[in-house]
Structures are given as structure tokens and as C-alpha cells.
Amino acid sequence: MTRTPGFLIDGHLDLAMNGLDGRDLTLPLGILRANDPVTGQTATVSFPEMREAGTRVCLGTLFAMPRTAESPQGYVDAEGARRQALAQLDQYRRWEAQGQITLLAGAQAVSAHLQQEDADVPLGVVLLMEGADPVRDADDLSFWVEAGVRIIGPAWGATRYAGGTGAPGPLTDAGKALVTAMRDLNLTVDASHLDDAAFWDVVEIGPRLIASHSNARARMARQDGQPASNRHLSDEMARAVAATGGVVGLVYLSSFIQPDWKPTDARAPLQKLADHARHYAELIGWDRVVLGTDMDGGFGQQKCPAGIDRYADVPRLLDLLPKAARAGVAGENWARWLETYL
């Protein structure tokens, strides 16, 4: 198989969310920053910027934001969540019609896309639903499969389906039905954001697993002796993901890299993210370690690790990894998974 050498695949980017927030991702980053409608978060991601980094494919999210004090316009029910996800799906389709991206809904499409050698090939986007509240019920999965969704994370915070980040709890009865239906349709569960109890319920049901953007809990031990957040993967969870053939994506967020990090602190050293990568490699092998940067996923340059000032800086992490592992972490490991399981 012929591929452009040195390509990247990013397992988690909230592209449509940013587009609907008013960010024109078709612009060069400098122009986007000069006209950025999102305040307090210096943008790092645009399509030209991703091209400069060598990114050929990413997992682009359908992410519905629930109503919180910080997000008063968020959804309060399944229909509200569905409207948000459909608006984001429409954004991806509009970008595709403009020639900015190509939506990839299967393994053969990913392979064909990666074999193209033209430097102007649009970004390939695999749809990933982050938080399953837009899915009405298990019978509604067929709608989203037809739309191109092949990977769903049941949780963000708590959803109708599962306990999640900062909201402990198992799969609900509806969650068990959803995950069972996903298994039967050969869809993949994204374990990122699942609470431990919900995660192990998923494992018992037995679908395919990935963790699109989750750093290592063992590297996040708090100085005050309190347990690390359930947002991060325990060693046992990482091994369970790998046991299904899955991969684990590294997140470029300082508070997910360095324990007790606060926005008033200096940005986390990039070496500490490399330490997360090495930790995972010791558990599950370098061939299961991938990128899931989550950049501009509710944070900007200010919270990225030191030395990552824009998306084109993403490959700097690779220089801190063993030479033999770099191409795999950059993109080959994701490519192998997508070409086998998507």
C-alpha cells in the first residue's frame, strides 16, 4: 500500500462545534485568530493549519453540549441534543460540498483516501459521536449509521445512557440496550469519558472499544492524596481497550497531562505528555498508542502543553518518543485500526 510518508491522524477534534461557534476553519490560522468570535481561547486549529501539520485524517465529533451554568443554551432533553448533532452533521456536509473535507464512512474509504498522493487532497473526516444523548434509543442507531457514524461514546458527563466524567455511575438500562445494539451492528464504543462502572458494564457486553482521547490515570496522581479524575484511563481500562484491538489517544491539554495543573500555572511540559505515551506503551505496546489531541475542544493555546502554540506544532511530541514508535503514533496505528475495523 502506497501512502504519503509522515502523515498524521488525529483521533479527536471538535471541528463542527467550532464551525457553528463562528470559527471559519477554512482560513489560515493567523487570519482566524484575528477574527475569532470565541473569546478567552486562542484558536489553534484550521484546515490549512492541519494540512501544514501533515494531517490526512481525523475523527471529527458530533458533540451536543448539555445545559450548564457555563452553557445556558445547551440541551435539556434528547430532542435538543439531537438538534445540535444534526446541525453539526450539516456543517460537515457543507464543508464536504465546498471541497474542504471528505467524509469517510468505512475502512475502504479510509484506505483509498490515505493512498492519494496529491498534496491538495481534502482532510478525511470519520464521524465520532461524543456523548450519546442525540441517539433517541437503540432503534435510532440505524439513522446515525446511515449518516456515517461508526463510533459512539455513550458518555460525556452523565447522559441518559451512562455515568461519565465527574458523574459516577453505571450504564443505565437504556445504555445497556444501546451498547448491545452497537455490538450487534459492529459499531465501536469510545470509552473516553465513561465512568469506571459504566466502562466495565460495556466490557461485559463486549463491543469493540477505543479511547479516542484519554491520558493515563497513573500519571495523574494528585498531590493531596485524592484519587485522580475518572476522566483518565486506569491501567486496567487501557488493557481492556487494547484487548479488543483498540487504540488509546493522547490529549494535548495541560490539566490532563500534569497533576494539579491550574490555568495560572506555566503550561505543562511536552515531555510529560511523552511520559503518558511511554506509560501506555509499557502496558499495551506502542502499536496501540495514537493521537487524540482534542485541540480547540473547549480550550485554546493557553492550555496546550508548552511548545504547542498552534496545530502545526502537534508533531513536536513525536521527537520525544523512540524513533521506532514515531510513525505509528503519528498515524500508522490509527490507519491500521481504521482500515481493519471501521
Image: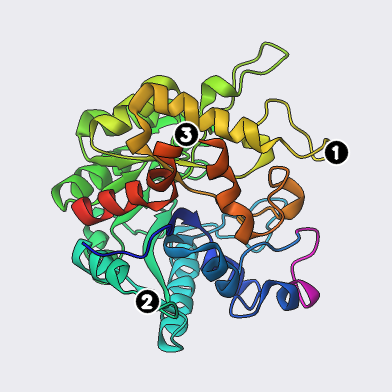
The answer to the question of whether label 1 and label 2 lie on touching residues, with beta carbons closer than 8 A, is: no
> Does the image show residue 244?
yes
The picture places residue 189, in percent across and down from the top left corner, at 31, 45
Q: Is residue 58 above or below residue 248?
A: below
Residue 130 position within the rendered picture, expressed as x and y whole percent measured from the top left: 44, 53
3D distance between C-alphas at marks 2 and 3: 32 Å
Q: 10 Å neighbourhood of mark 3: few (<14), some, or many (≥20)?
A: few
Residue 319 vertical position relative to residue 53 in the rendered view, above or below: above
Which residue is label 3 attached to?
A: 322
**For marks 1 and 3 on the same chain, the one whose residue lies earlier in the sequence:** 1
Q: Is mark 1 on a helix, strand or loop?
A: loop
**Is residue 234 or residue 118 the one in the foreground?**
118
Residue 162 occupies quadrant: top left
Within 10 Å of the Cα at label 2, are there few (<14), some (14-19), or many (20+) other Cα atoms? many
Amino acid carrying mark 1 in the image: Thr
Residue 263's x, y, as percent? 80, 40
Q: Which of marks 1 and 2 is in front?
A: 2
Residue type, mark 2 in image? Thr
- Highlighted range, magenta: 33-41
Q: Is mark 2 on a helix, strand or loop?
A: strand
Observer-side mark, 2 or 3, equals 3
Asked if residue 230 can be seen in this view, the reply is: no
Q: Is residue 319 left or right of residue 102?
A: right
Residue 57, image x and y in percent? Answer: 40, 63
Q: What residue type is labelled 3?
A: Pro
To which residue does mark 1 refer?
264
Cα separation, mark 1 vs mark 3, equals 32 Å
> Which residue has dot 2 on it?
102
Quarter in which the C terminus is drawn? bottom left
Q: Nearer the viewer, mark 1 or mark 3?
A: 3
